[in-house]
Image (cartoon, rainbow, N blue to C red):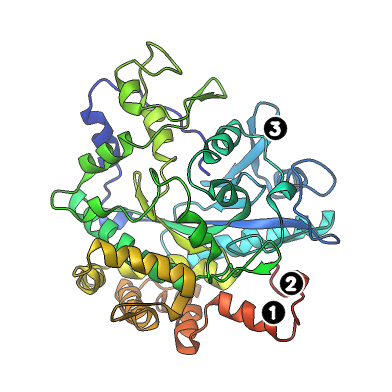
Amino acid sequence: MSIPQSGGGPIERHEQLAEYLAEGCKPKQDWRIGTEHEKFGYCKDTHLPIPYRGERSVLAVLEGLRDLRGWEALYEGENIVGLQKDGANVSLEPGGQLELSGAPLETIHQTCDEVNQHLADVKDIADKVGVGFIGLGAAPEWAHEQMPMMPKGRYKLMTDYMGRVGTLGTAMMYRTCTVQVNLDFSTEADMVQKMRVALALQPVATALFANSPFFEGKVNGWKSWRAHIWQNLDAARTGMLPFVFDEGFGFEAWVEYALDVPMYFVYRDGKYIDALGQSFRDFLKGKLPALPGETPTLSDWADHLTTIFPEARVKQFIEMRGADGGPWRRLCALPAFWVGLTYDQTALDAAWDLVKGWDAETREALRVAAGKDGLHAQVGDINMRDLARQTLEISREGLRARARPGAGGMVPDERHFLHALEDSVTDGKAPADELLDLYHGEWNGDLSRIYEGYAY
């Protein structure tokens, strides 16, 4: 979850809302890659989730990163709730999931180095305190009652609200993990094309990265239970957003959509003020019940944009949100997949040609089928495995055309980061399929074995 925004003066004109988004436009040479990933922490001896405080805790890991690896602590009140260093942030999800929000970097070589260094640092500190971390899309065994709540005012408010809308909102907050990538756009038209491709092909990412076939100690019947959860919570702020494909979509249309998403909070003087279900439109008029007579700042607008959770979203960049958290090879593969599709114009055009004939019903059906059946999904005449193969071919060509070398020039481009995904298409097996094979095979139904083989 995003940390509170800061800076930005008062909003005095409606046009400032779209102008804020447009400020994200960058020339191609300034495009960067920001990778985010979350992971579950657990006590090695009991396999139970780690609490916020204690000898084996989230706080112990944060303090270790601060004291031994030079991260600067971020506080809410007296509690450490995050870290920052060199343009990157470490933050906490509601149930104690540890998230790295990476620095904006030029190449996937760099972002993969960043991920690997982070995981090595976390493992070193976690080993010292008897804690482990595992990359999965959903907690395999833990019940909601076993999950701690991190000491962040935002999460307390969200927990209350999620209990009133949808059916699985609190499960999303406390018992899921994702890997995401943030990507830039050059113009409004570029944003539009990238958002349309991002939403249409998000189900392919869901299928390729599906990694949550267990929940509460049982096989749940979905390859990505995390995707199922996202399909059954607050409909006002999730989904595939058909309006993005309407003629005339752009920054202003996103503003109008965002203004209709009910608010969660306003952040003032280090505290979250309850604005649950209230209207940002009323806030603009000085009629917000939570702050009568007060009008918003641009940082309030930036905060509100972080409370919108569709499959892809616009801030001052585009965020790809469809993939389960997973093993380290997948953490590097996710940015490679989307960079290949969107950072080369020929590849982006080819990706759009692949999906432009689909209607909203087809896109939604693919979303549901990807979570349920993964690479084995079938929607009409669209076979997910074949679609994934075509999509990866486009991404691979996009990375070849980008020609960003690594390893001091010994590696000519970034295509090798797709190997894990290409192997999945060849074998017809995403991580969820591999986990189910083990569960029904050598694990003999003993789900505790997952901590042995799949921890970082």
Residue 439 tag number: 1
Give the mark nearer the N terminus: 2 vs 3.
3
In the image, is residue 48 above or below residue 442?
Answer: above
In the image, is residue 124 above or below residue 54?
Answer: below
Q: State left or right for residue 428 relative to residue 451.
A: left
Q: Secondary structure at mark 1?
A: helix
How far across and how far down the image is residue 438, in percent?
68, 82
Q: What residue appears at the point 32 percent right and 60 percent down from the top-left corner?
A: 199
Q: Quadrant of residue 43?
A: bottom right
Q: Quadrant of residue 41?
A: bottom right
Residue type, numbered disc 3: Asn
Residue 79 tag number: 3
Of residues 441 and 421, the one nearer the viewer is: 441
Residue 339 is at least partly visible in this image: no
How far across and how far down the image is residue 87, in percent?
51, 46
Find disc 2 in the rendering and name its residue.
447
Residue type, numbered disc 1: Tyr
Q: Mark 3: give few (<14), some (14-19) or many (20+) Cα within 10 Å.
A: some
> Label 2 to label 3, Cα distance in Å?
34 Å
Q: State left or right for residue 67 relative to residue 366.
A: right
Of residues 151 and 68, the one nearer the viewer is: 151
Q: What residue appears at the point 76 percent right and 73 percent down from the top-left corner?
A: 452
Q: State left or right for residue 24 relative to residue 321.
A: left
Residue occupying the far top of the picture? 293
Residue occupying the far left of the picture? 247
> Label 1 to label 3, Cα distance in Å?
39 Å
> Label 2 to label 1, Cα distance in Å?
7 Å
Q: Secondary structure at mark 3?
A: strand
Disc nearest the viewer among 1 and 3: 1
